[in-house]
Amino acid sequence: MQELLEKIIKDCQPYTEEGRLANYIPELAKANKNALGICVMSDEGRTFCVGDYAVGFTMQSVVKPLILLLALLDKGVEQVCSLVGVEATGKPFDAFNYSDQALTGAHINPMVNTGAIALCTLINGATYEEKFERLLSLAKRMTGNPNLSLDTSVYLSEKATGHKNRALAYMLKAYGMIHEEVEDVVDLYFRACSIKVDCKDLANIARILADQGVDRKTGERIIEAEYTRYINAIMTTSGMYDGSGEFAFNVGIPAKSGVGGGIMAVVPRRMGIGIYAPALDKKGNSVAGRKALELLSKQLGLSIF
Ligand code: GLN
């Protein structure tokens, strides 16, 4: 495995030149465009790391499965499904893809911004501070990393510029789908997106999702299998936004990308994968990261289809 990963890193390095760093969140444009790291963890926790696997980056949309998970843990499937749907949008992650006449849960997907922002309102906590602390502690449990923290510079950078997300939240409020103060809700969302991780952290979350919620290393059940099925299914249809169909076809595993350059990929019952390569394609997916997953999937026969 180690040898295979070394080869994949070498073959994919040129692809880091093809993408562009996200710059609509100014702080993200400071990343090293040529970075590329991979971590693969087998379900029982055997770990293989190559390249820039230890470089820290912000989760961005990779946190969306965790927001969904916490909403499920706090409020259950019924309440989550009454607020958000499961259909792929086929649109960019920040699209206003709704008709003027109606906006209902069926139009909102938790793997894109509107759905994730809406779900922030289902997280328990007396204050927004407490809601964030609860999300961070779930992230610590899922990554197995007690030192996880917020990247304050990225958080403040998005808070200063994230007006499109504010607009999406106001739209949710206009249609009566959320009732809280927009600034509080988006602040939680911005902080969630700015949780700093590395490839190992993502691989560990993915390993637990791959094993139906059980941490094989300790035998502890971290989450209900019913929730991992929900999350893995929705990552398959929507985790790479409007690139999800092509990704299903060529790579064939549930995965979630983020504009920080991370991809978390779940190979059910086999392994969790964390990738970092911050240069993105036009849809906001890591170019070299996507290519590395494709090579890995083809070499090891990982496609679930
Ligand atoms: N924080 C980013 C945003 O809301 C996350 C988007 C992404 O990673 N695709 O714009």
Image (cartoon, rainbow, N blue to C red):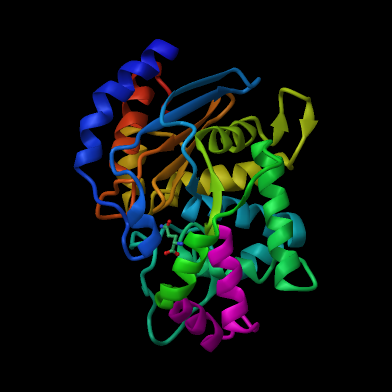
Residue at point 46%, 37% (across, down): 55
Which image quarter has ligand 1? bottom left
Asked whether, in this view, residue 50 is left or right of residue 188, the answer is left
Dominant secondary structure, magenta:
helix
Camera-nearest residue between 101 and 214: 214
Image quarter where the N terminus lies is top left
Q: In this view, does 77 lie above or below 292?
A: below
Which quadrant of the view contains residue 16? Answer: top left
Camera-nearest residue between 193 and 26: 26
Q: Position of residue 25 (x, y in %)?
A: 38, 64
Residue at point 58%, 72% (across, down): 187
Residue at point 45%, 61% (across, down): 112
Residue at point 65%, 63% (across, down): 80
188 inside magenta stretch: yes
Which quadrant of the view contains residue 189? Answer: bottom right
Extent of the magenta region = 166-192
Q: Is residue 282 above or below residue 191?
A: above
Q: Where is residue 40 in the image (x, y as percent from the top left)?
A: 50, 25
* Residue 155 visible in this rendered orientation of the protein: yes
Asked whether, in this view, residue 149 is left or right of residue 276, the answer is right
Q: Where is residue 293 in the image (x, y as percent from the top left)?
A: 37, 31
Q: Is residue 282 above or below residue 104?
A: above
Image quarter where the C terminus lies is top left
Number of callouts in the render? 0
